[in-house]
Image (cartoon, rainbow, N blue to C red):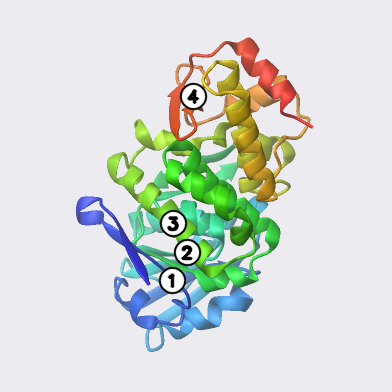
Amino acid sequence: MITLDVALGERSYPIYIGADLLGQAEIVRRHLAGREVMVVSNDIVAPLYLDTVMAAFEGLRAEAVILPDGEEYKTLAQLNTVFTALLEKRCSRQVTVVALGGGVIGDMAGFAAACYQRGVPFIQIPTTLLAQVDSSVGGKTGVNHPLGKNMIGAFYQPRCVIADTAVLDTLEPRQLSAGIAEVIKYGLIRDGELLAWLEENMEALVARDRDALSHAIEHSCRNKAEVVAADELEHCQRALLNLGHTFGHAIETGMGYGRWLHGEAVAAGMVMAADLSARLGWLSGDDVARVEKLLSRAKLPTRGPALGPARMKELMAVDKKVQDGCIRLVLLRALGEAVVTDQFDPALLDQTLAQCQV
């Protein structure tokens, strides 16, 4: 087992990475606030792993609430289902909320924990690669709105993250690829060594080689932990983690939540970011081709849907990085070096949006 730390002073917490961690009750039990537990999961993950997790809470007052699976259910209505379960079971402020699932469950369970009785502890047990390498770390929680993705939420850190690599054996190939998109993101924004490693080992990663998965998860979490420790509330540096996300969130919202997986939309968005960076003279054509090739090898889309430049810009305007009505984007000065900027010719953005759609 590998243990990393997210250094946030008194709110610091560990990330545990390894195989078969769900069966090791002592790991999760040491982070409980008391004798009450509410596990939040979904109808895909629960049949596979809920019994194992609940066994870790033997002798405690442990309950579970099961939500429907999918980004389209990341809503205030489903969040209220969690609140109802907590209230019906008369859970106190000593309850620990445990998120067992992918990014949707982690975001919703964390937001519920942040709100219930004005804040109760929670633990992340991510079961998708995307959640293990990105969304479970850093304390971003929330739900979607029909007008914008992740626009309602809170920063609220977990007590620990338990990333069991064995659960990835049951992950659908499309979900695996979606997670790899976020791994590639770290290489593009700040970790040239990881980018080179991905170019050498992509086929092993897609084939779920255990060593390759562990390497990718460890280095992704290390990157995320360093950025979060330096800029927890996304005032500056943490915004760089959103490479491709302004484009990607627009795709998800425009197409309807759930039709494109988050990682798929981000992959197409990263190509758009690379294309615009090249139009600004920061990347070469070979750099853009290198990004596209790596994403293709990960079985990810490199073009967005045909929403059109006008609709994309309308959707991109509902983004947390917008300031004074200006769209701000994460672009690439070079492969491995990202910047947040609104200094680009709108005509070049139009060209990118037209070029990078099917």
Which residue lies under the disc numbered 2? Answer: 214
Q: Which mark is residue 110?
A: 3
At 60% across and 12% down in the image, what residue appears? 346
Q: 133 or 62: which is nearer to us?
A: 133
First reached walking from the N terminus: tag 2 or tag 4: 2
Q: Which mark is residue 322?
A: 4
Mark whose residue sits in front, 3 or 4 = 4
Query: Is 44 on the left-hand or right-hand side of 3?
Result: right
Does residue 115 appear anywhere in the picture? no
Specify the amino acid type for callout 4: Val
Specify the amino acid type for callout 2: Ser
The residue most toward the left is: 10
Mark 3 vs mark 1, CA separation in Å: 22 Å
Q: Which mark is residue 18?
A: 1
Characterize the local packing of mark 2: few (<14), some (14-19) or many (20 or more) Cα atoms within 10 angstroms. Answer: many
Specify the amino acid type for callout 3: Gly
- The N terminus lies in which quarter of the figure? bottom left
The reply to whether callout 3 and callout 1 are in contact (CB within 8 Å) is no
At 50% across and 67% down in the image, what residue appears? 211
Query: How far across and how far down the image is residue 112, in percent?
Result: 45, 57
Q: 251 or 91: which is nearer to us?
A: 251
